[in-house]
Image: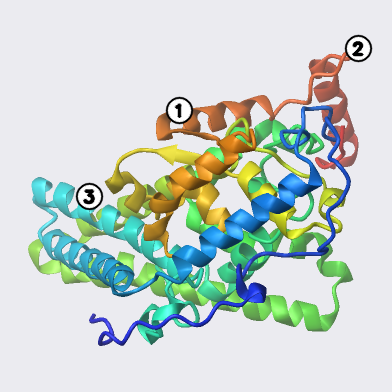
Amino acid sequence: MTLAPERPVTTAPTTRSRVNSRLSVASDAPRPQRPALTASGRPNPAAHLTPEDIEQIGVELDALREEVMSSRGAKDAAYIRTVIKTQRYIEMGSRAVLLFSAFPPAWVLGTAGLSVSKILENMEIGHNVMHGQWDWMRDPKIHSTQWEWDNASPSRQWKHSHNEIHHTFTNVLGRDNDLGYGILRVDEDQPWTLFYLFQPIWHVSNAVAFEYGIAAYDLELGGYLAKRKRMSDADKATFRADAKEVLTKIRRNMTRDYVIHPLLSLPTGSFLPTMGANLVANVVRNLWTNTVIICGHFPPGIATFEKTSIEGETRGEWYLRQMLGSGNLSGSKAMHVMTGNLSHQIEHHLFPDMPSNRYAEIAPRIRDLMARYDLPYVTGSLPRQASSVYWKVIQLSLPNKVEGRRRRDVILKAAKHFARTGNLGRRY
């Protein structure tokens, strides 16, 4: 595969209405001072900020974004083209080695290379291209409207659930379905049900098969199963069309990984080893992707927000929510590339359509801004953040600690209710 010929790099003029393609502003008027405590009684990390402080934060971030976006050019274009070429060379080389995967060293080398190529394609390339980070290049081969990635979820459906919903309603309980993807309880403000008692199992299972979990999530399969009896014929037809698109994508990917490439290895007796290598590479990619994402959204110290808190939300408040609702990962440059630069999750949530190679450049300035306004800049190593999330998943699988009641009694009550009614979803 080859890239489209390089084109002159141009940047469309930026107006105030286009300063951030995901920024949702309901009001231009500053709102009253924020309460000291959240709805659940936890300290509000932004309570000390005046409305004027918050709007000044927005002004500074607007200026920073304009500075970076107006400086995009040939160096940035060369970066993404180099990453894409590198990924494709790694994939082609790895698949060539796997033709001889009956030989154990070839299997190890080919599987490792294929895992890396799949991670690069999903993270630094696919995710960021579909955010529109490279649309300014006017290259149809690296454009958000044309890119289809190596993932079970069709790009069209993913862009709707991720770009349009998650990045607009970041960490808003009841609006941002990425908070636990509908199967995990990741915040004390989420009501507990007996279903969540088993969430450590759901979490690990979802991580292993992450691309398929995301496909079902983007399809809104859970909502369809819950509401299908009340849905109109038109809505059912739309769901069936979307489901067909997902199944077609899955079939195409599985045919490539588990039929075509293993068959190419048949002459060397490597059919089954190649099939196994593709399976391992897909699982490694799923586990890595899931780990990076949970580290950016669920560690302790990251805030969630009530639906009512975004009513009349101003520009500065939207920016503030992105900073408080995200967390970063520390590490080497190679690690940042392998995470798709989502190790700079705070910067990504502030500017989701900024080229990913520029996040490291602005990260110190974002951190300085947050320090000046006494806001927590959540960051840590990948092992530290990942372990904190797994512990959080275990803790929140149980009901909240409430004075005067034992969690064991709540679980037994929920279990008895389930035995009588078959309903796992009663809230406690």
Element carrying mark 1? helix
Please give the residue where the numbered disc 3 appears in the rendered image.
112
Q: Nearer the viewer, mark 2 or mark 1?
A: 1
**355 lies above or below 273:** below
What's the distance in space between the residues labelled 3 and 2, CA to CA? 53 Å
Cα distance, mark 3 to mark 1?
A: 24 Å
Does dot 3 land on a helix, a strand or a loop? helix
State which tag comes first along the sequence, 3 or 1.
Answer: 3
Single out the mark in the foreground, 3 or 1. Answer: 1
Residue 138 in picture, x, y percent from top left:
41, 85
In-image side of 46 versus 376 (left or right): right
Q: Earlier in the sequence, mark 2 or mark 1?
A: 1
Q: Amino acid at mark 3?
A: Ala
Instruction: Say which amino acid is labelled 2.
Output: Gly
Q: Which mark is residue 384?
A: 1
Residue 167 seen in the current view: yes
Q: In the figure, residue 151 lies in which quadrant?
A: bottom left
The picture places residue 202, in percent across and down from the top left corner, at 60, 41
Q: Which quadrant: the C terminus?
A: top right
Crowding near the residue tagged with mark 1, few <14, some 14–19, many ≥20 C-alpha atoms within 10 Å: few
Q: What residue would you read off at disc 2? A: 404
